[in-house]
């Protein structure tokens, strides 16, 4: 229900005490003001700094109080039909049993009058003593249409230039979802002032604003989108799957009836780009990336861990549409074998949230210890797809070499890639990157920082023992997932066939 209707219903139903939980004081006051004006009921506000002020209706004489108790007494004495709004009152009742008792007494008395007492609680809590007396209203953040109105209002100002089509407009509004009205207003204005126009580029600025909200929770971390499609070599099948869903969070997709994608599980060999892909999805879709640290959820008190998870997921939903990245999800499960089942419960809560979530939070879960993954995690309905990231095949290794050479401002054409690709069979992306860095060190220290060559890269390759050789059994075990068809290959099939034939050199002996 929208805020105006909800407040009106409360006032009409003569609830004596209404607590409004919101950080958006201005919006609450606006709504209340409009409501009181239309009902012709005076609205009087009190706070610690300015004491009583009449907001709508004739100024009230004789209302004076400099402390919370006197303010409550003044409310008690006032006559006629009146709405009172007490601001920041949660600060007044912390450790103040007399204030709490007075509010409680007053709530009981006001039932027989035409007075309504409202208390705004930005982030504060309702004392348990008041739970029976008060109606608690949790003000939801502005929805799509509220934000659309705010944007429209700004765009109607004569000097504002607007560049973009319907799709851009839709993405700008969606990226602001989760912000409060004043935050949205501020960030839209900032975006316009920065370069005089509001366009596609401003989505990043809006995402930055959202990152600050996310930073307030310990288990969540906002990660600036810093990896694009060009930073990932190979994995064409996975990339194609993601590209197909690029516009899935837009209004057009919704009107078309497309379901919003839920998430993807990335399983596979260490160092093949699972974490890298998580970062890429967010940039590709231009939505914020939030990383959930399962380990940071666990607290020492009973129920604390579940509470932490609930808060973190709620926050992620507030920022939606977004990508929620759960790295090494299997670690969250093993947080303690002897923790009285806490990790099992937290994991269970996580699974049911994944199944039932209403907001567009796209979950990217990565894992490389499949043995520890509970089978129910990958059951249909939680993830849209499970991808397996295998040892890269020749074509992929070529691309990965190119990515990392370009990243270091070197032209790949200056190297014998055919040779490198053949020599790097069994090496994963992370190892290829390491090879490039190692070759740079070799050349840099050899004389006057000479340029590194194919030979240096070959030497670096030889120095490094890839995991596929060092931990043969473990990697073979992992790859059985793919062979058994429990996951889709992140690379294309033909390539997969070729790479499946790969047998580590030692095994051939
Ligand atoms: N396909 C790839 N293309 C380009 N670079 C890659 C690729 N795979 C890995 N890398 C490089 O290796 C680094 C480490 O990879 P990443 O952390 O994504 O691996 P991972 O699969 O998450 O490994 P782990 O299972 O150990 O967490 C990346 O930051 C990137 O520089
Ligand atoms: Mg990783």
Image (cartoon, rainbow, N blue to C red):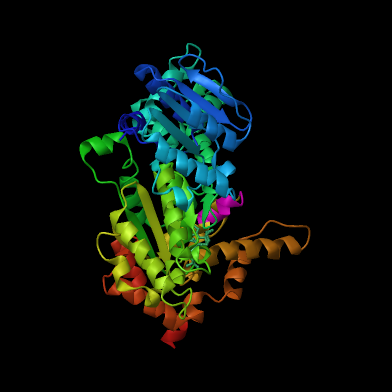
Q: Quadrant of residue 4?
A: top left
Along the line of sight, which residue is nearer the eye, 118 or 508?
A: 118
Q: Position of residue 405 (x, y in %)?
A: 57, 54
Compared across the picture, whether 287 is left or right of 208 comes to left
Residue 348 to residue 341: above or below: above
Observer-nearest of 158 and 437: 158
Residue 322 in the image: state x and y as whole percent.
41, 46
Q: Is 14 colored magenta in this rendering?
A: no
- Whole-percent x, y for residue 402 in the image: 51, 54
99, above or below 75, in the image:
below
Percent of width and height locating residue 448: 78, 58
Residue at the top extreme? Answer: 158
Residue 505, can we see it?
yes
Residue at far right of view: 448
Q: Dividing the image into 4 quarters, which one contains the N terminus?
A: top left
Report the magenta stretch's main SS: helix
Residue at 43% x, 71% y: name it.
Answer: 343
Quadrant of image for the C terminus: bottom left
Report the magenta residues as a range: 402-409
Residue, far bottom? 509
Picture residue at 58% right of the left edge, 68% below the top: 458
């Amino acid at each position: 229900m929208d805020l105006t209707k909800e407040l009106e219903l409360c006032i009409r139903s003569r609830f004596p005490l209404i607590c409004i939980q919101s950080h958006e004081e201005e919006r609450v006051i606006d709504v209340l003001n409009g409501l009181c004006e239309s009902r012709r009921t005076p609205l009087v506000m009190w706070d610690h700094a300015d004491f009583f002020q009449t907001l709508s209706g004739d100024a009230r004489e004789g209302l004076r109080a400099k402390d919370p108790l006197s303010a409550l007494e003044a409310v008690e004495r006032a006559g006629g039909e009146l709405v009172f709004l007490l601001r920041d009152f949660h600060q007044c009742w912390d450790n103040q049993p007399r204030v709490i008792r007075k509010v409680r007494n007053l709530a009981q008395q006001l039932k027989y009058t035409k007075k309504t007492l409202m208390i705004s609680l930005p982030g504060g809590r309702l004392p348990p003593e008041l739970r029976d007396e008060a109606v608690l209203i949790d003000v939801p953040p502005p929805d799509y249409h509220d934000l659309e109105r705010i944007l429209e209002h700004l765009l109607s100002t004569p000097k504002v230039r607007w560049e973009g089509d319907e799709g851009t407009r839709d993405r700008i509004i969606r990226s602001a979802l989760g912000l409060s009205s004043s935050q949205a207003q501020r960030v839209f204005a900032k975006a316009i002032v920065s370069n005089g126009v509001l366009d596609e580029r401003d989505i990043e600025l809006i995402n930055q604003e959202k990152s600050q909200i996310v930073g307030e929770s310990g288990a969540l971390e906002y990660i600036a989108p810093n990896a694009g499609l060009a930073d990932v070599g190979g994995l064409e099948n996975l990339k194609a799957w993601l590209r197909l869903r690029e516009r899935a969070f837009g209004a057009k997709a919704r009107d078309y009836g497309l379901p919003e994608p839920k998430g993807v599980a990335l399983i596979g060999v260490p160092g093949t780009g699972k974490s890298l892909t998580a970062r890429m999805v967010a940039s590709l879709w231009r939505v914020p990336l939030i990383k959930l640290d399962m380990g940071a959820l666990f607290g020492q008190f009973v129920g604390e861990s579940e509470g932490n998870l609930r808060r973190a997921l709620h926050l992620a939903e507030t920022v939606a549409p977004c990508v929620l990245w759960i790295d090494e999800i299997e670690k969250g499960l093993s947080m303690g074998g002897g923790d009285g089942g806490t990790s099992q419960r937290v994991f269970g809560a996580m699974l049911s949230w994944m199944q039932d979530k209403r907001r567009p939070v796209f979950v990217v879960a990565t894992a490389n210890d499949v043995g520890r993954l509970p089978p129910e995690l990958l059951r249909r309905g939680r993830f849209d797809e499970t991808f397996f990231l295998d040892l890269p095949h020749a074509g992929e290794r070529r691309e990965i070499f190119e990515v990392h050479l370009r990243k270091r401002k070197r032209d790949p054409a200056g190297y014998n890639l055919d040779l490198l690709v053949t020599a790097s069979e069994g090496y994963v992306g992370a190892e290829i990157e390491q090879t490039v860095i190692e070759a740079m060190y070799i050349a840099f220290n050899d004389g006057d920082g000479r340029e590194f060559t194919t030979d240096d890269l070959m030497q670096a390759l030889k120095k490094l023992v890839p995991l596929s050789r060092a931990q043969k059994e473990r990697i073979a075990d992992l790859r059985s997932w793919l062979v058994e068809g429990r996951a889709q290959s992140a690379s294309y099939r033909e390539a997969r066939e070729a790479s499946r034939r790969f047998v580590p050199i030692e095994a051939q002996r």
